[in-house]
Image (cartoon, rainbow, N blue to C red):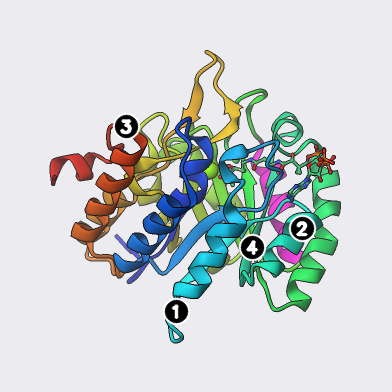
Amino acid sequence: MNYPKSVRIVEVGPRDGLQNEKVAVDVATKVALINQLAEAGLSYIEAGSFVSPKWVPQMAGSDQVFAQLSTQLPENSNTVYAALAPNLRGLERAIDCDVKEVAVFAAASESFSQKNINCSIAESLERFKPLAEQALANDIRLRGYISCVVGCPYEGSVDTETVAGIAKQLLAMGCYEISLGDTIGVGTPASIEKLLGRLLEDIPAEKIAVHLHDTYGQALANVLIALQMGISVIDSSVAGLGGCPYAKLANGGAASGNLATEDLVYMLNGLGIEHGVDLKKLIATGNFISRKLQRVNGSKVGIALQ
Ligand code: HMG
Ligand code: MG
């Protein structure tokens, strides 16, 4: 079996994780979490989100978080701290905070797009164009997410052609990479293989990342398929935190649980794939944030190796 020699882990816990938590997390705790993740060797951390605080109050303190991070970064640090930006207002906040990388987020389902960012897919892509132009003009790198790549909580299964079309448009406006979000974790190795097979017809593997929520316990199996298909950028979240507040399941529950970074690192160790993360330090970080949130650690490896 062919696997990439190394993987770049995109740690989304401080953003995707904390955006969905009921317990309010103060700025100091967010900064401590991010610093511990960096100390554990994570070189790309999504540290916050410049969205409307009315929509996602948990991310309201992102400006203060970034202000504190920049003062603590050593001069030669290669750590990337990124943020979500849904519109020009979000990008302006990112520029004010001296953020070097932002991510726009589209969806492959109309209903989810409306619920999450209050506009259609086409409107969102139009909205992202000037944002992309301004970001690139300010030397800010741009990542693109697509949510609901295999299934939508409101519309059911999603067509791979729709995902491919949106991915190509995001790349054309300047995104260097597309992160494919299985927002409600319904994908299986079969549907992920089908999706990636279609995307790889048009897009090189180096421009694709996977972002797999573990709601149905499929995330690691889906990562394995993605690795076998040449994908080497994997999003994950410390302690398995995460979920989108606008992704409700049919039974009323929330689509929670990103793939836990600890579980990913353990599997990559077993496969002999490089990643640069110290598992022991990462587990300590997962325990730290789980205690703060008064919740059970969502990483199986984190619990097994406590
Ligand atoms: P809207 O209500 O249509 O926008 O929301 P608006 O332009 O009418 O603005 C409404 C209010 O928000 C105004 O304030 C604006 O100033 C303010 P008011 O005049 O009422 O006082 N506002 C902002 N404030 C701060 N920063 C901003 C900003 N923009 C507007 N950037 C909008 C549209 C996109 C803003 C809103 O829908 C929004 O913020 N949505 C974000 C939802 C979100 O963050 N979801 C979670 C992240 S996506 C995700 O988790 C999926 C992912 O993980 C991948 C996967 O798993 O699939 C990435
Ligand atoms: Mg997500």
Q: Earlier in the sequence, mark 3 or mark 1?
A: 1
Looking at the picture, tell me which residue is in the foreground, 296 or 146.
Answer: 296
Closest to the camera, between mark 4 and mark 3, is 3
Q: Is residue 282 above or below residue 157?
A: below
Q: Mark 4 — residue?
A: 102
Looking at the picture, tell me which residue is in the foreground, 155 or 145.
Answer: 145
Q: What stretch is highlighted in magenta?
A: 159-172
Q: Which amino acid does label 1 sit on?
A: Asn
- State the image coordinates of residue 249 (x, y, percent, origin top left): 54, 21
Magenta-drawn stretch contains 74: no
Q: Main secondary structure of the magenta part?
A: helix
Q: How crowded is mark 3: few (under 14 residues within 10 Å), some or many (20 or more)?
A: few
Q: Mark 2 — residue?
A: 169
**How far is mark 2 from mark 3, CA to CA?**
39 Å
Q: Give the farthest residue toward the bottom.
A: 76
User: What residue is rendered at 53% in x and 68% in y?
Assistant: 206
Q: Which amino acid does label 2 sit on?
A: Gln
Q: Which amino acid does label 4 sit on?
A: Val
Closest to the camera, between mark 3 and mark 1, is 3
- State the image coordinates of residue 224 (x, y, percent, origin top left): 35, 50
